[in-house]
Image: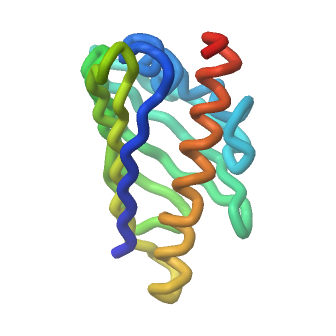
Amino acid sequence: MASAHATEVFNCSREDFFKIVSDYEKYSEFLPEVKSVKVTKKSGNTKEMEYSVSLIKTFKYKLKVTEKLNESVDFVFTEGDVFKTMKGGWKLKDKNGKCQVEYDVDATFGLFVPGVMAKTLVSVNLPLMMANFKKRVKEVYGK
């Protein structure tokens, strides 16, 4: 299993960050590896979606996401090309007028992916993803 964790403080409110992180279909506008996200089903605070992502190659996978307004976004893998399992989420907290974000992901791969490569796919991409979310906050909120 490959795991990654990050904690960052964003220059926006918890509500503002939640709006960005839960606007999945716009991820391709600011996350270069994400080619598309399509929400396929909504039911209450749960959404199902299909991602098309290009890292080393292009692959697709589906996630089921559960949202708690302005508090958290948890996801679990349901099917796809590369992953065998994946789960994780975003936890949002107020911190001196800003938003402290904790992001966790645990993944196992269905294909033969050496452990070092799996860890790299999960953890190396994480700082880039967080930097892109910071840029998005600045673009959207000017902060």
* Position of residue 93 measured from the top left corner of the image (x, y, whole percent): 27, 25
Q: For this rendering, which residue is in front, 2 or 93?
A: 93
* Position of residue 2 measured from the top left corner of the image (x, y, whole percent): 39, 72
Q: Quadrant of the N terminus?
A: bottom left
Q: For this rendering, which residue is in front, 131 or 116?
A: 131
Residue at the image position 39 percent from the left and 61 percent from the top: 4
Q: Quadrant of the C terminus?
A: top right
Q: For this rendering, which residue is in front, 56 or 143?
A: 143
Is residue 112 visible in the rendered image? The answer is no
Label tally: 0
Q: Quadrant of residue 67?
A: top left
* Position of residue 110 measured from the top left corner of the image (x, y, whole percent): 45, 75
Residue at the image position 73 percent from the left and 66 percent from the top: 57
Relative to residue 79, is residue 1 depicted above or below? below
* Left or right for 31, reference 38: right
* Position of residue 45 measured from the top left corner of the image (x, y, whole percent): 29, 19
What color scheme is it? rainbow
Relative to residue 143, is residue 123 depicted above or below? below
Residue at the image position 47 percent from the left and 75 percent from the top: 119
Relative to residue 113, is residue 35 depicted above or below? above
Residue at the image position 31 percent from the left and 28 percent from the top: 92
* Left or right for 25, reference 11: right
Is residue 38 visible in the rendered image? The answer is yes
Relative to residue 96, is residue 134 depicted above or below? below
